[in-house]
Amino acid sequence: MRIDPTTLWTILGMAVVTYLTRIAGLAFADRLVLSGRAKVAFEAIPPAVLIAVIAPTALATGWPETAAAAITMVAALRLPLLATIAIGVASVVALRAVA
């Protein structure tokens, strides 16, 4: 198997850039002082990323997964994390068995 040098350099470059952005985040996070709207915006990033990852799968796979995602969302508003996970798994299994 022969690896194209351009592909290899591209992969290595992407790895270096990814590593540097992660290290920069760790190095500068404690120096960043946020208040007001900026703090609220930064606190909204994790849920937004989670929704961006989950929504395409929940909406594109079929009605059991979409319904299970909705059930899990309602559970997440009222229950602790472990109970939410259990309800999410149980609801997708049950709804797939019905479908």
Image (cartoon, grey):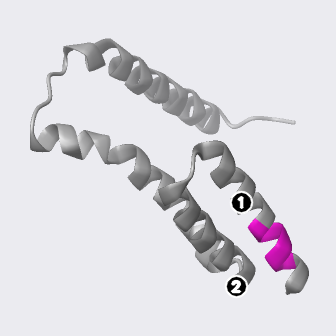
Task: Look at 26% across and 40% down and name the residue there.
Answer: 42
Q: Residue at x 11, y 44 (%)?
A: 37
**Circle number at residue 71:** none
Who is closer to the viewer here, 18 or 32?
32
Residue 84, image x, y percentages: 64, 53
Other residues around mark 1 within 10 Å, as few (<14) / some (14–19) / many (≥20):
some
Q: Quadrant of residue 70?
A: bottom right
Q: Position of residue 3 (x, y in %)?
A: 75, 35
Q: Residue furthest left?
A: 36
Looking at the image, is 61 positioned above or below residue 32? below
The reply to whether discs 1 and 2 touch (Cβ–Cβ < 8 Å) is no
Classified by dominant secondary structure, the portion drawn in magenta counts as helix
- Give, as a three-letter code, the residue at label 2: Trp
Which amino acid, by three-letter code, is at mark 1? Answer: Ile
For label 2, count other residues whose C-alpha is less than 10 Å away and answer few (under 14), some (14-19) or many (20+): some
- Residue 94 on the magenta span: yes
Q: For residue 32: magenta? A: no
- Residue 82 is situated, as x and y percent measured from the top left of the image, at 67, 44
Camera-side residue of 54 and 91: 91
The residue sitting at 67% across, 50% down in the picture is: 83
Q: Quadrant of the C terminus?
A: bottom right
Report which residue position mark 1 lands on: 87
Local secondary structure at mark 1 = helix
Identify the residue position indicated by label 2 in the image. 63
Q: Secondary structure at mark 2?
A: helix
Q: Position of residue 36 (x, y in %)?
A: 9, 39
Q: Where are the magenta residues, as a range?
A: 91-96
Q: Is residue 96 left or right of residue 55?
A: right
Q: Nearer the viewer, residue 47 or 29?
A: 47
Choose mark 1 or mark 2, whichever is in front.
Answer: 1
